[in-house]
Image (spheres, rainbow, N blue to C red):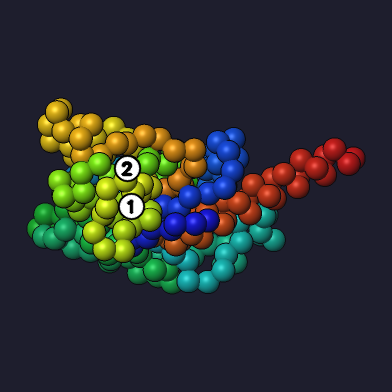
Amino acid sequence: MKNEQKEKNKASFIIDGDETLANAIRRSSNEITIAAIDEVEFRKNDSALYDEILSHRLGLIPLKENRKLNEIDKCSCDGKGCNKCQVQVSLKAKGPCTVYSGSLKGDVEVIYGKMPITLLEKDQELEFVAFVRLGKTVKHAKFSPGLVFYRHISEITVKNADQAEKIFEKLKASILNPPKGKIKNGETYQCSEDVDYIETFIESAENKSKLIEVKYGEELVFIIESWGQLEPKEIFTESVKALESNLKEVLKTIKK
Ligand SMILES: [Zn+2]
């Protein structure tokens, strides 16, 4: 990993390797275990939303387990559910109010407390208990750790430094080898954005070949946007580990 660029919950970095490897790593991000609400028991629901819709919304709230959990189908309870493989959370609210994700009570960390779940009118009530379990994206999208993708790096060569300054200012967060001071004519910068997107910052067609020259480079840039359960870099390393363990499984079948 080199030329890493980081914002909160987003990272991009160049990797050594070709597209087949990059794609295998990307797909393996679907095999990381992530906690999410997996089962809901409604005691009261006077809101305008059906139980099924509320359950779906609850499942998509990013949260972190505070203690280490087993995957339910690998747990000693044989998939029945016990305190080693699930955490109980609950919520109780009475209107008029907006019910937010932050109102969930239980031994979990809700990453974004201001996600609206539903609206309650005067005297309407919502009450449920729910179980948080580990799962993988291959089973359900609610277990997704984030958005993981890659593309070829874009290379921007400066032709008119004075006028191109504005373009670089707008792309600042995506330049992987930012200049120490001002940009200089003839220098090339690597950018994690797409070539077509970079070109939208060149205001007129006649400037197109005068300010900068943009083309795809050979190297691949990995871009990871986390939903908050894991750091972007952890998503990458966990994906590599998942790929490694799947490959080991394949080897075992051959040895037999
Ligand atoms: Zn269990």
Mark 2 crowdedness (10 Å alpha carbons): few <14, some 14-19, many ≥20: many
Task: Identify the residue under disc 1.
Answer: 175
Residue 100 rendering spot, x and y as whole percentages:
23, 60
Tell me: 21 left or right of 192: right
Going by the numbered disc 2, the residue's amino acid type is Thr
Residue 116 rendering spot, x and y as whole percentages:
22, 55
Residue 26 visible, this angle: yes
Residue 202 rendering spot, x and y as whole percentages:
18, 37
Q: In which quarter of the image is residue 183?
A: bottom left
Going by the numbered disc 1, the residue's amino acid type is Ile
In the depicted structure, whether residue 146 falls above or below residue 250 = below
Q: Quadrant of residue 70?
A: bottom right
**Mark 1 residue element:** loop
Residue that appears at 53% across and 71% down: 67
Along the line of sight, which residue is nearer the eye, 27 or 44? Answer: 27
Q: Which of marks 2 and 1 is nearer the N terminus?
A: 2
Residue 135 rendering spot, x and y as whole percentages:
53, 51
Task: Identify the residue under disc 2.
Answer: 157
* Closer to viewer: mark 2 or mark 1: 2
**Mark 2 residue element:** strand
Residue 60 visible, this angle: no
In the depicted structure, whether residue 138 falls above or below residue 244 = above
Q: In which quarter of the image is residue 61?
A: bottom left
Along the line of sight, which residue is nearer the eye, 111 or 123? Answer: 111
